[in-house]
């Protein structure tokens, strides 16, 4: 009987059902401990010890039914006290695999909680590639001890890999690949595949090397079935290979993976010697982290923020942007104060001002989102930047005329004042043009400053569209209506 595949809508429900027994057990454990603390003093220690052992055994049974990814998800969603309880019950080998699945902030919290002896035992269960995934989270002394415990070739690999910048191809590559020499036959290549203890993840091709371990081509696994066994590898290999340098940006590599439908790709040094392999799973994980970082950076937050972390730490993280928001809001009110006399004469202006600011903020954020995406995909260059400006300004002009007219007509009918409708239309149109201009300029300026183009862009846009929206609307009203 063929098992039924779960739909995307069903998967979150299935995950919730798998985690529910553990969450219930943790809740039950908290309740029972609370009750035992209220018992008579001479009996409470004995009762609490007995109950604690029973609850601990029940929790371990439930955890053993989960895979490492589910346990990682569980730890990411638990408050600190329950998270620590679960972590202490994990076997060291399981804990190492789970550590790779965690949010950086959660992983750092658990690493800080773990004593050095257990942490070294956990790291000892990881291979060299896995160790390089979390090297930046480990205390330097512990990392060095973990590296020293590796075999010589693995030790050299880890030292080489962690030396590459974060976010580079070298930082994301692995050493698990199937390599054959160009002088071998297809029979030898098939034997090489068969003799491997296990196929490395996402293995779709063999890497072919020549003299001095230089990469000369690749042979897709499917091709091994198409040629006679005595055919030389050099006669059937593909020499048009997409390869990367360890210094290349991993985001650029991800775009190449998408463009050429790659599953894996070789990484070569400056002498074209094969030094590693880049896998689609690894590169997609990196792109997802970059996307999450940009989405949070746009709102002034860090990507590794722990949703269930300490309250004071979460509050402190938001202080800088709250201060900037307060300053920009205060500046926006100064624009309004310049026209207090106008507002006193025409109270209707006070009710219409927020509409102008809101429409401009929406347009600016849409433009900024498109520009940030274009920068991430390397679609925006110096040669086509002018076209982007012209296109977005023209779109804003069209929308400004259409929707400005609609809002102007609404203001005219509501307040029986045709000039007020003209002011409304003009202010909306000008604010949309300004919003588009700022939505392009802010990300481009951040790139010039070598900053994340998404960093705080919504804060800047909100300030600009609010303050200038007020200024344009009230300025036009002063010139035309007063």
Image (cartoon, rainbow, N blue to C red):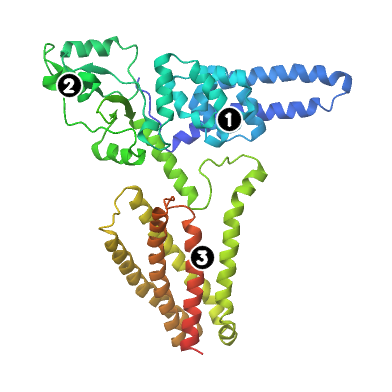
Across and down, in percent, residue 82 comes to: 65, 30
Image position of 448 with respect to 80: above or below: below
Q: Which SS class for mark 2?
A: helix
149 lies left or right of 193: right
How far apart, in angstroms, are the residues tagged by discs 1 and 3? Answer: 44 Å
Give the crowd class for mark 1: few <14, some 14-19, many >=20 residues within 10 Å.
Answer: some
For marks 2 and 1 on the same chain, the one whose residue lies earlier in the sequence:
1
Give the crowd class for mark 3: few <14, some 14-19, many >=20 residues within 10 Å.
Answer: many
Q: Residue at x 32, y 47 (%)?
A: 377
Q: Residue at x 70, y 26 (%)?
A: 29
- Pointer 2 residue: 223
Q: Nearer the viewer, mark 3 or mark 2?
A: 3
For marks 1 and 3 on the same chain, the one whose residue lies earlier in the sequence:
1
Q: Are marks 2 and 1 in contact (CB under 8 Å)?
A: no
- Pointer 3 residue: 463
For marks 3 and 2 on the same chain, the one whose residue lies earlier in the sequence:
2
Across and down, in percent, residue 449 comes to: 42, 54
Which image quadrant is residue 130 in?
Answer: top left
- Pointer 1 residue: 20
Q: Which SS class for mark 3?
A: helix
How far apart, in angstroms, are the residues tagged by discs 2 and 1? Answer: 47 Å
Q: Are marks 1 and 3 in contact (CB under 8 Å)?
A: no
């Amino acid at each position: 009987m063929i098992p039924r595949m779960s739909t995307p809508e069903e998967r979150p429900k299935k995950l919730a059902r798998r985690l529910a027994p553990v969450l219930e057990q943790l809740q039950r454990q908290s309740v029972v401990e609370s009750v035992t603390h209220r018992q008579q003093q001479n009996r409470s220690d004995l009762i609490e010890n007995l109950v604690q052992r029973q609850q601990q055994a029940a929790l371990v049974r439930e955890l053993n039914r989960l895979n490492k990814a589910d346990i990682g998800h569980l730890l990411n969603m638990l408050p600190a006290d329950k998270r620590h309880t679960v972590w202490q019950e994990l076997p060291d080998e399981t804990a190492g695999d789970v550590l790779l699945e965690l949010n950086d902030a959660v992983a750092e919290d658990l690493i800080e909680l773990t004593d050095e002896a257990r942490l070294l035992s956990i790291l000892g269960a990881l291979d060299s590639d896995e160790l390089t995934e979390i090297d930046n989270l480990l205390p330097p002394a512990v990392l060095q001890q973990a590296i020293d415990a590796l075999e010589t070739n693995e030790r050299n690999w880890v030292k080489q890999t962690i030396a590459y910048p974060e976010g580079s191809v070298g930082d994301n590559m692995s050493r698990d690949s199937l390599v054959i020499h160009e002088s071998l036959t297809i029979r030898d290549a098939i034997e090489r595949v068969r003799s491997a203890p296990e196929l490395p993840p996402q293995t779709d091709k063999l890497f072919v090397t020549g003299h001095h371990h230089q990469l000369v081509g690749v042979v897709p696994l499917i091709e091994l079935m198409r040629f006679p066994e005595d055919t030389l590898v050099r006669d059937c290999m593909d020499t048009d290979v997409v390869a990367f340098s360890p210094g290349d940006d991993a985001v650029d590599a991800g775009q190449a993976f998408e463009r050429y439908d790659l599953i894996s790709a070789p990484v070569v040094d400056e002498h074209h010697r094969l030094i590693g392999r880049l896998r689609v799973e690894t590169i997609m994980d990196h792109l997802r982290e970059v996307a999450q970082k940009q989405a949070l950076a746009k709102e002034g937050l860090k990507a590794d923020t722990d949703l269930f972390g300490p309250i004071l730490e979460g509050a402190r993280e938001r202080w800088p942007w709250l201060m900037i928001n307060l300053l920009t809001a205060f500046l926006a009110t100064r624009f309004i104060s310049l026209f207090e006399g106008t507002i006193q004469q025409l109270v209707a202006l006070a009710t219409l001002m927020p509409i102008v600011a809101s429409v401009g903020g929406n347009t600016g954020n849409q433009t900024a989102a498109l520009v940030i995406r274009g920068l991430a995909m390397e679609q925006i260059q110096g040669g086509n930047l002018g076209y982007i400006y012209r296109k977005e300004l023209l779109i804003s002009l069209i929308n400004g005329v259409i929707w400005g007219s609609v809002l102007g007509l609404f203001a005219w009918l509501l307040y029986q004042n045709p000039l007020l409708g003209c002011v409304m239309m003009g202010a909306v149109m000008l604010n949309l043009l300004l919003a588009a201009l700022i939505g392009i300029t802010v990300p481009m300026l951040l790139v010039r400053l070598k900053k994340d183009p998404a960093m705080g862009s919504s804060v800047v846009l909100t300030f600009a569209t609010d303050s200038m929206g007020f200024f344009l609307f009230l300025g036009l009203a002063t010139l035309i209506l007063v």
